Amino acid sequence: MTLWTSADAIAATGGRSAVDWTATGVSIDTRTLEPGDLFVALKDIRDGHDFVAQALEKSAAAALVSYKPKDIPVDAPLLIVDDVLQGLADLGAASRARSNARIAAITGSVGKTSTKEMLRAVLSRQGKCHAAEASYNNHWGVPLTLARMPAETDYAIVEIGMSNPGEIAPLSKLARPHVAMVTTVAAAHLASFDNLSGIAVEKATIMDGLEPGGTAVLNADIETTGILRDHATETGATQVLFGTTADDWQVKDVRLTGDVTVINATGKGHDYLFKLSVPGRHFAMNAVGVLAVADALGADPVQAALDIAQWVPPAGRGTREVIVIDGANEDETLDLIDDAFNANPTSLGASLEVIAASKPHDNVGRTIKGRRVAILGDMLELGPDEVQMHRDLVHNAHLQSLDLIHCTGPLMHHLWLALPEEKRGQWAEHASDLAARVTRLVDAGDVVLVKGSKGSKVSLVVDAIRKLGHRRPQEE
């Protein structure tokens, strides 16, 4: 299926190409490039121009560059532009302009990617749905998502993130969504903002790119809802609220069991009773928001409620799996909750509720009694109060249900010191040190949560736990 012809790409970017070519995809990484992709030579840690020859050797259709690399023939399929990132943005804008897709844009301090994947799961059963792989939500990820969008797409989902003020509005204006959703506003990236209100003001700018008559789907349960609603009024967006206090899409009841979440909600005068295949109150809240977005896009929310049970969290965002420690004894297992991609006080609190509702297994490990074990890495970019935020976790009600808490990193050391002695496990400055001790951290029968910001590298502990045996999906 043709995604870009050289003529279309030239028209979009104002670039020039010595030969004609046809691309079936767009890639920024030669490691994942597929034959027929247009390779975009972005500059990051490395200059993408250094990889153009490799991309062409791997049968890239062409390369988007700002100059011809030395080792490339004159007649090579190159699309030469003044600036590669701007060229990618121009492709994204042209792709958006030629599409009749109904588009949703999602932002929020917590839950962007999980919510995007929920929405993908339900919309893909009601039409041709396009969404980014992974968390492609920044100044290159959003235009890449749009540039990859097939012209015949029915629904598209664009995730938009930020680290600093002023980043969201330009990306929303590029995506021109019909629906903009804010999952929540929480203490994340406080190193770049004065307070929570400042984060809310930035998140609200996702509405700046809404198409005329567009809809803002907003969390009704947070202290900064008023800021979001005021901005929606300024932009003229139709407001749809979701949450326990919302009139539009109200969460009536959420019940967590060991492996599912049952949700009772009302929306537009109808009752909804549906389930998720994983536990999590935070997942439940966003699931109701997903129904609101689906409805605002013109999809069927009833069908969406039925299909959302097919969704499972992306890797590192609450994925649950069973690790078989002894291949000769299928009962010697532990339950692993991999939430090692990101962390802030709000998301960590949600994860602690999940493990608190989980049931360990007795009489299968060295300790006889199965335990709820948390392995926690630093929460990063929280600003000047970061030490107190880590220390205050000791008061979390769900943490009281845990049997053992291991910590890694200089910030989590403050929680570790505040823990009661009977719950205090091991601490290490680096996650790699904890990973090396993993056989002493967990046991068969345990339910184990691993949570931390990506920069804490606590995912190394996840990998070490997986290497204790082999894994199988939770549903088995």
Image (cartoon, helix red, strand yellow):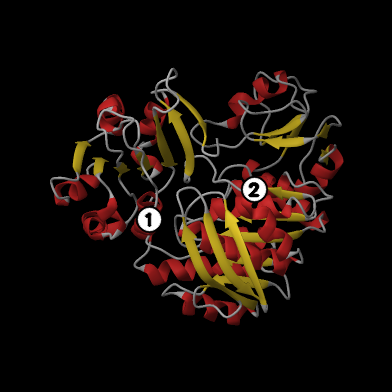
Residue under label 2: 310
CB-based contact (under 8 Å), mark 1 and mark 2? no
Q: Secondary structure at mark 1?
A: helix
For marks 1 and 2, give the CA distance: 22 Å
Q: Quadrant of the C terminus?
A: top right
Residue 353: image tag: 1
Residue 170 visible at all: no
Lateral position of residue 54 relative to residue 94, left or right: left
Q: Foreground: 14 or 424?
A: 424
Answer with the quarter of the image where residue 133 lies: top right
Count the marks: how many? 2
Reply above or below: 401 against 234.
above
For badge 1, the amino acid type reads: Glu
Lateral position of residue 385 relative to residue 327, left or right: left
Residue 471 rendering spot, x and y as whole percentages: 48, 28
Residue 129 rendering spot, x and y as whole percentages: 74, 50
